[in-house]
Amino acid sequence: MDHARKLPTMTDVARKAGVSPMTVSRALKSDGLVSEDTRARILKAADELGYVLDSTASSLRSQKSDFVAVTIPSINNANFADTVGALNEGLKPRGLQILLGYTNYDMHEEERLIAQLLRRKPLAVVVTGGTHTPRCRRLLENAHVPVIETWDLPENPLHHVIGFSNAQAVQSMVDHFVAKGLTRIAFVGGDTDRDTRGLDRRRGFVAAMQRHGLDATRLIAAGPPPISMREGAEVMARLLDTAPDTQAVICVSDLSAFGALSACQRRGIAVPGQISIAGFGNFEVGAICVPSITTIDPSPKDIGARVARLICRVLDGDAPEPVLDHLAPRLLLRESSI
């Protein structure tokens, strides 16, 4: 048996369909110059032969691709999955695909991925966050394609920005608790510079507490990101042991908040009767658990949809100037807070 069977070529498809290789190329790229009958005959021939268009070769010839490069810090975070999903849906009508890079909250890994992705000549680059290594910034600044930073409001944007202030979002949560008369408030997570958005949330907590003249030192480290439910439970247990008079806890994410809630329930501590708990992200688990968890909704799907619309505008030549799209996350008050 011949295991090195020759792959079908465009010439094979053309011969089977009775057309030229150029016509096959146009048909497979949905060129309007090819009639529907001819395209159908070519697609049938390609399907029967098992032929797949080599888009890499064609992009090298045209110096253009049909994909958008996207980097995200986590592949199992529902927020980032929602953003990528909405982005994909927005790009689909244009025949564009997403090439995804996973940074694992590591700026140096982001740098490595960006260098690799740019070699593939993407039509645009979408990155999560606004903090990058110096080399990564240089790569993106010299990429000569639209660059969009998301989920953040960087002080020195590379180009386009669609995001929000993580610090301001958490400040609104602090203001809510203070307005309810709670003053002994703790923050869980955001203790390393790997998760720059988590660190911004921590800074926002400190700034808001200081603005109210309150003690801002109840900062509980939860380890490197992403912070899991288990880690949320562990740090909550630690907080209850070291500062049992704490009235409210703001967690860096809904997952860690769920863990904190579970730790309280295991100890028979009433939430919100004895302590209030809040998270960040509006994850499904926070909406369906009992009690449901107060949170910040960053509208991840909206971020993805806006990025897709911006990319289409830029490709159409409709957005020559840098766009700063400042979103306003919503505070969702639920059963876990007074």
Image (cartoon, rainbow, N blue to C red):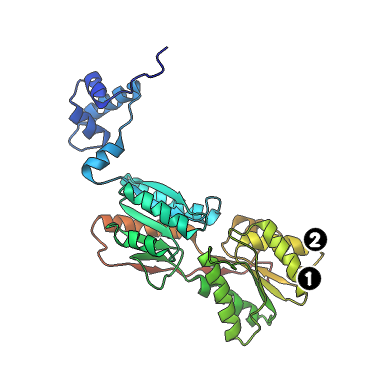
- Seen in the picture, residue 144 relative to 186 is either above or below; the reply is above
Residue at the spot x=29%, y=27% of the render? 43
Give amino acid for label 1.
Answer: Asp
Residue at the spot x=25%, y=42% of the render? 60
Say what secondary structure mark 1 lies in.
helix
Spatial CA distance of label 2 from label 1 is 14 Å
- Seen in the picture, residue 120 relative to 182 is either above or below; the reply is above
Q: Dot 2: within a 10 Å radius of its alpha carbon, few (fewer than 14), some, or many (20 or more) residues?
A: few
| Residue 50, percent from left and from top | 35, 24
- Depth check: give the residue in front, 22 or 306: 22
- Depth check: give the residue in front, 172 or 64: 64
Q: On residue 266, which mark appears?
A: 2
Q: Is 207 on the left-hand or right-hand side of 59?
A: right
Residue at the spot x=53%, y=63% of the render? 194
Q: Is 218 on the left-hand or right-hand side of 49?
A: right
Farthest residue, direction top: 1
- Depth check: give the residue in front, 19 or 102: 102
User: Which quarter of the rendered picture does the N terminus lie within?
Assistant: top left
| Residue 56, percent from left and from top | 30, 39
**Residue under circle 1?**
241
Give amino acid for label 2.
Answer: Arg
Farthest residue, direction right: 268
Residue 189: quarter of image: bottom right
Residue at the spot x=23%, y=32% of the render? 25
